[in-house]
Image (tube, rainbow, N blue to C red):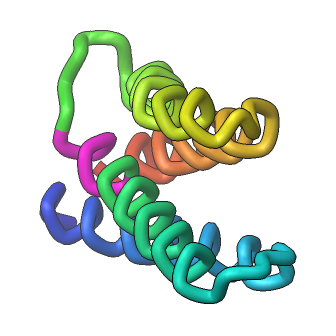
Amino acid sequence: MNKITLGIICGLAFGILDVLIMIPMPEKDKRKKTEAMIGAFLERFMVGLIIPNLNLGTGYVVTGIIVGLGLSVPTAVITRAYAPIIGIGVVGGLIIGLISNAVI
């Protein structure tokens, strides 16, 4: 499979999964919740897109962990929700790295 195609598929899947996780989240302002969900989708989409297409010389699994962590930390700092955001980013990056190892 083409790396770009794999990245788009992984990005869409990870982004949609993250948005589904956020649906039950209580929020008084619907606009803020919508903005948070759009931002989360875009961040996770980029994690999925970048991992199969980036060669750090460490293998896809380590690359996935690094990218998942690196793209999640700024959002975690802004929202002060460190564990869930960084945890999902690292686990998602790891899984996408494993998928990339298996497919590419």
Q: Position of residue 62 (x, y in %)?
A: 48, 20
Residue at 24% over, 11% down: 57
Residue at 60% over, 48% down: 92
Indicate left or right for 63 with 8 as reference. right
Indicate left or right for 60 with 27 as reference. left
Residue 53 sits above or below residue 32 on the image: above
Of 84 and 35, nearer the camera is 35
Q: Is residue 21 magenta?
A: no
Of 2 and 94, nearer the camera is 94
Please tell me how many numbered marks the rendered image carries: 0
Residue 77 sits above or below residue 50 on the image: above
Residue at 69% over, 46% down: 88
Q: Is residue 10 visible in this depiction of the protein?
A: no
Q: Which residue lies furthest to the bottom in this view?
A: 30
Of 1 and 22, nearer the camera is 22
- Give the overall secondary structure of the magenta segment: helix
Indicate left or right for 102 with 50 as reference. right
Q: Position of residue 43 (x, y in %)?
A: 39, 54
Q: Where is residue 77 in the image (x, y as percent from the top left)?
A: 59, 28
Magenta span covers which residues? 48-53
- Quarter of the picture holding the N terminus: bottom left
Q: Where is residue 46 in the image (x, y as percent from the top left)?
A: 30, 54
Q: Residue furthest front?
A: 29
Q: Is residue 73 visible in this depiction of the protein?
A: yes
Of 80 and 69, nearer the camera is 80
Q: Which residue lies furthest to the top in this view?
A: 57
Residue 8 sits above or below residue 56 on the image: below
Among the 4 quarters of the image, the one containing residue 81: top right
